[in-house]
């Protein structure tokens, strides 16, 4: 038996000194077990490696050789061809890439690379169009017939070293890894054993042995998640009681009479769904989904009024102070002729005002309270809280939800979001919510005209904006906030070495140039919330004409006079996100205009952006995003307080997601607390991973 334990630090393992250990820690590799479960990002397939001399037309092949020549031909604006020659003795293969000029900066004569792709025999020599290019470490001979794992790296460690380290950790310690599923469960579900799967993931025998190994971990990960979600759902149903808030046709039409316009079909339908849930003694747990401008606020108002009509109180939470104020103003205007009292509670209230509203909540004097996150901090007391609504959901997690639970009664709960969610993401992140969809825009909404502009049209665009500003309109200018190679407000990278616009620089340039004659302000995530708030308020009151901002303005802001938007480095953003941004303009009597500018050399980005010009459908754009960039860009799981998925790929693994979901439900039907010894280790995983995030308590 080895005396080394899986949970021992990597620090004193062979070849790992304290310097190397610090590098590994940057990748969250602290203990041996972390290395064993550090899965490859991809694989280098050396099993199809062929000598150039043996290539034939239409072969799928990989070729390793030394770069002997390269050339970049630029053919006018944004058009280029890059040629790369690699050689083996006197045979040459040519790789060709169109419109990827940046490749030229990354190669050098004499470097060893592997080109993988489809062979085309031209008269002079074999060629590959847009092959995959991999740099091959020179101390590593191409191992014909083998598949090498490719790991995520960080500065201070190279691929061959990482491979050696992980290989040794896996080979020496995999025997100690505990199986999670019973023998019979594994054979029923055709799951590879955990030790075998770890070996095949890191040291695959051949191309076909990777997928079953990966599948095992994907299933495990998704089952764990689905168990967690369903455990929570069962717990809520068993333990939490909500007040029945009933309705009838009289109450219904009375509430609806407050709206100064005809409700859309979709609004009526969703109001019905909400009313049905609120009429039950179990807490409603519903998500309302609808594109920007489809009128979600009306549904919120309807539900709040329903609570009030039943002698209960309702709360509407917004992600920012600006939005809270906006809702407060709207509600006050709408309910001006009624007895219903509306209050506001935000972080910036004076302590006297705060005391007053807190008192009114406790005594029941106030029926509807609008607020920000300040609402959920430290023990709030309500006389009779019946409903909690969260607008633009992504900043509130399950934890905050739990904090508003009252002693005996759990309020009904509704979250509203304009961020469209593909089905798979919804099933994972929001598996415990029912979903309503508002799929209809109110009539006579102003169209937003979207233009994809070339950088040489920028002068003209600024001129157009100046003209509209002089007519009295207001404008947003959106750009990323850059820090090194990260976008600060977006959680994504700037995407390598392309130049990228920066919001602070943009502001300086505009104030001292194009927009010198106008009042301009700057908003980004590095400012204090007071700075952000006051800039937003000045803008919404019309004191500033131009707001230069990052995507912090994305959520819900409604300034009808703002009809212009310029988005710089637009290729850096997700399509759904651009659509959300665009939803900020065209909200009033005047049509909206959006100009998208991509980074200079972003050919791919441009093609993506055309979708935003072509369609006004946020759901379609979200699906496209999901196909093009994966779910990460739609939803930072971090914002939900949910741990990220490590192995599962929600697009690729949809079928496994569905079966994991069914299996989780079946398992819990038979064993609602997961107390059987068969599931002991699995339960431990579920609790460790999701117990805190989902507020699941362990009764067992
Ligand atoms: P969102 O779903 O983006 O939160 P809002 O609730 O802010 O949308 O509504 C957008 C605008 O449309 C508001 O100015 C609102 O008053 C208006 N609106 C909502 N429903 C209707 C309707 N049925 N008919 C006309 N205008 C409506
Ligand atoms: Mg809204």
Image (cartoon, grey):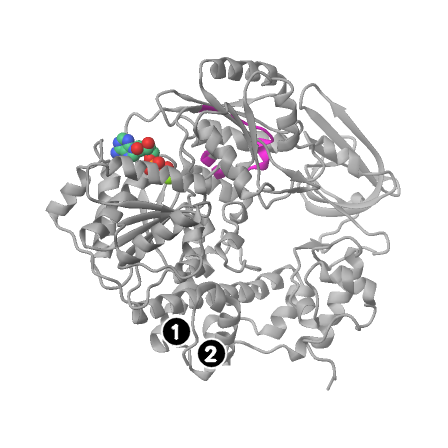
Tell me how far mark 1 sits from mark 2, CA to CA: 9 Å
Q: Can you identify the residue that label 2 sits on?
A: 679
**Disc 1, SS:** helix
**Mark 1 touching mark 2, by CB under 8 A?**
yes
Which residue occupies the foreground of this view, 356 or 507? 356
Residue 32 location, quadrant = bottom right
The residue beneath circle 1 is 667
Residues drawn in magenta: 563-580
- Is 568 positioned to the left or the right of 54 in the image? left
Residue ID at (64%, 32%): 504
Q: Residue furthest front?
A: 352
- Mark with earlier residue (1, 2): 1
Image: 6 above or below 303: below
Q: Position of residue 358 (x, y in %)?
A: 35, 54
Of residue 251 and residue 452, the one placed in the foreground of this image is: 251
Q: Is residue 603 visible?
A: yes
Q: In this picture, is 38 found above or below 544?
A: below
Q: Quadrant of the N terminus?
A: bottom right
Q: Is residue 502 visible?
A: no
Q: Position of residue 19 (x, y in %)?
A: 82, 63
Total number of numbered labels? 2
Disc 2: CA contacts within 10 A as few (<14), some (14-19) or many (>=20): some
Q: Residues within 10 Å of mark 1 (few under 14, many from 20)?
A: some
């Amino acid at each position: 038996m080895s005396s080394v334990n899986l949970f021992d630090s990597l620090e004193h393992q062979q070849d790992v000194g304290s310097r190397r250990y610090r590098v590994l820690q940057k990748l969250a590799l602290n203990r041996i077990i972390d290395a064993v479960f550090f899965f490859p990002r991809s694989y280098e397939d050396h099993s199809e490696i062929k000598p150039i001399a043996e290539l034939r037309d239409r072969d799928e092949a990989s070729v390793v050789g030394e770069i002997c020549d390269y050339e970049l031909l630029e053919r006018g604006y944004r058009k280029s061809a890059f040629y790369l020659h690699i050689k083996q003795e006197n045979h040459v293969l040519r790789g060709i890439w169109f419109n990827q000029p940046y490749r030229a900066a990354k190669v050098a004569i004499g470097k060893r690379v592997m080109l993988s792709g489809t062979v085309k025999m031209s008269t002079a020599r074999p060629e590959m169009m847009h092959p995959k290019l991999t740099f091959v470490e020179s101390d590593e001979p191409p191992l014909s017939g083998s598949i090498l794992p490719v790991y995520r790296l960080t500065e201070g460690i190279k691929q061959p070293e990482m491979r050696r380290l992980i290989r040794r950790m896996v080979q020496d310690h995999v025997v100690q890894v505990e199986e999670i599923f019973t023998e019979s469960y594994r054979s029923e579900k055709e799951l590879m054993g955990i030790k075998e799967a770890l070996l095949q993931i890191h040291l695959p025998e051949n191309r076909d042995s990777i997928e079953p190994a990966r599948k095992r971990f994907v299933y495990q990960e998704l089952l764990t998640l689905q168990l967690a979600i369903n455990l929570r759902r069962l717990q809520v149903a068993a333990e939490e009681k909500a007040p029945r808030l009933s309705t009838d046709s009289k109450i219904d039409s009375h509430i609806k009479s407050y709206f100064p316009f005809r409700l859309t079909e979709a609004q009526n339908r969703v109001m019905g769904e909400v009313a049905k849930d609120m009429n039950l003694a179990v807490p409603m747990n519903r998500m309302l989904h609808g594109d920007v401008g489809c009128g979600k606020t009306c549904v919120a108002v309807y539900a709040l009024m329903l609570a009030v009509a039943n002698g209960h109180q309702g709360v509407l939470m917004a992600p920012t102070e600006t939005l809270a104020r906006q809702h407060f103003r709207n509600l006050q205007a709408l309910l001006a002729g009624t007895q219903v009292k509306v209050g506001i509670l935000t972080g910036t209230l004076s302590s006297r005002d705060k005391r007053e509203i807190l008192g009114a909540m406790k005594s029941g004097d106030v029926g509807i309270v609008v607020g920000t996150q300040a609402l959920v901090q430290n023990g709030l007391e309500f006389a009779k809280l019946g409903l909690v609504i969260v607008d633009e959901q992504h900043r509130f997690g399950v934890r905050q939800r739990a904090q508003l639970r009252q002693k005996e009664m759990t309020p009904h709960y509704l979250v509203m979001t304009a961020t469209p969610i593909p089905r798979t993401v919804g099933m994972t992140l929001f598996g415990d919510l029912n979903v309503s969809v508002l799929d209809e825009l109110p009539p006579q909404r102003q169209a937003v005209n979207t233009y994809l502009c070339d950088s040489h049209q920028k002068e003209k665009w600024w001129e157009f904006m100046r003209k509209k500003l002089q007519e009295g309109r207001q404008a947003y200018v959106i750009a990323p906030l850059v820090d090194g190679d990260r976008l600060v407000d977006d959680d994504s990278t700037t995407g390598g070495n392309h130049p990228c616009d920066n919001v602070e620089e943009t502001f300086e340039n505009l104030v001292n140039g194009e927009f010198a004659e106008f009042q301009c302000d700057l908003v980004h995530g590095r400012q204090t919330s007071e700075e952000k708030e006051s800039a937003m308020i000045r803008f919404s009151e019309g004191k500033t004409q131009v707001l230069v901002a990052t995507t912090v303005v994305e959520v819900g802001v409604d300034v009808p006079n703002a009809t212009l938007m310029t988005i710089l480095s637009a290729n850096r953003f997700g399509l759904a996100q651009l659509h959300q941004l665009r939803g900020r303009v065209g909200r009033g009597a005047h049509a909206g205009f959006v100009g998208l500018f991509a980074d200079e050399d972003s050919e791919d980005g441009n093609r993506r952006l055309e979708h935003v010009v072509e369609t006004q459908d946020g759901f379609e754009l979200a699906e496209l995003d999901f196909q093009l960039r994966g779910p990460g860009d739609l939803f930072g799981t971090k914002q939900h307080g949910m741990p990220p998925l490590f192995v599962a790929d929600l697009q690729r693994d949809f079928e496994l997601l569905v079966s994991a979901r069914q299996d989780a439900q079946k398992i819990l039907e038979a064993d609602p607390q997961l107390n059987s010894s068969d599931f002991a280790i699995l339960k431990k995983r579920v609790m460790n991973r999701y117990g805190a995030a989902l507020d699941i308590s362990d009764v067992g």
